[in-house]
Amino acid sequence: MSNEQKPSAWTTVQDGLREDYHVLKIRRDIRRHDGDGRVGEFVIIDTPRWVNILPITVDGNVVLVEQFRQGIRALSLEIPGGLVDATEDPRDAAERECTEETGFASSERAELLGEIHPNPAYQSTRCSLFVWNGCKRVSEQRLDDGEDIRIVEMPMDEMLEKVRNGTIRHALVLGAVALWLLQKK
């Protein structure tokens, strides 16, 4: 294949659902390369749609959440987010997740920053990223059973420094911050 030629797609020969874990499903698909016909087995993780939201207060601070993340076995400083219910609009889900996790909300509607695929190599996941301006504390947290979240409010410059110095490493947060910064240009 030359550098000018696009890579070939792979056609699914057989879909195979293996495990259903509610928040994700793991499949093992058999696919055939459209260019040369070779066949391969690929593991794919399917998830419901995700949302993350960058809440900005009336004072211009950002509202973050800190929680223990099982995958990395450590605390993680992030923006609120979660799964979109099957019949739910992503914007509504983002606003709901923010209010549940932080107690912050705004009379304004959240604005879509963009949509990303967090890891398209083996995930079908689509994540919608939002910014929500004019937020203020309107309620107490309403956490799920598996959540233990500390609310962290800080100036935007301080959060950006935590991104620069590697304190904040969550890829979805980095995607939201990048899209927010590009929007501000």
Image (spheres, helix red, strand yellow):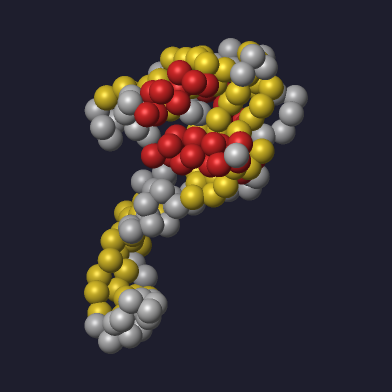
Would residue 21 be found to the left or right of residue 58 on screen? left
Q: Nearer the viewer, residue 115 or 17?
A: 115
Tally of numbered tags: 0
Q: Nearer the viewer, residue 6 or 76?
A: 6
- Coordinates of residue 71 in the picture (x, y in percent): 28, 35
Picture quadrant where residue 105 is located:
top right
Is residue 143 at all visible to an observer of this figure?
no
- Coordinates of residue 59 in the picture (x, y in percent): 64, 14
Residue farthest to the bottom, as pictured: 36
Residue in view at x 50 percent, y 28 percent: 80
Picture quadrant where residue 98 is located:
top right
Q: Nearer the viewer, residue 125 or 144?
A: 125
Residue in view at x 58 percent, y 26 percent: 55
Q: Nearer the viewer, residue 106 or 142?
A: 106
Would residue 142 be found to the left or right of residue 21 on screen? right
Residue in view at x 43 percent, y 37 percent: 174
- In the image, residue 58 sits, relative to residue 14, either above or below, namely above
- Quarter of the picture holding the C terminus: top right
- Coordinates of residue 124 in the picture (x, y in percent): 42, 57
Would residue 117 be found to the left or right of residue 2 on screen? right
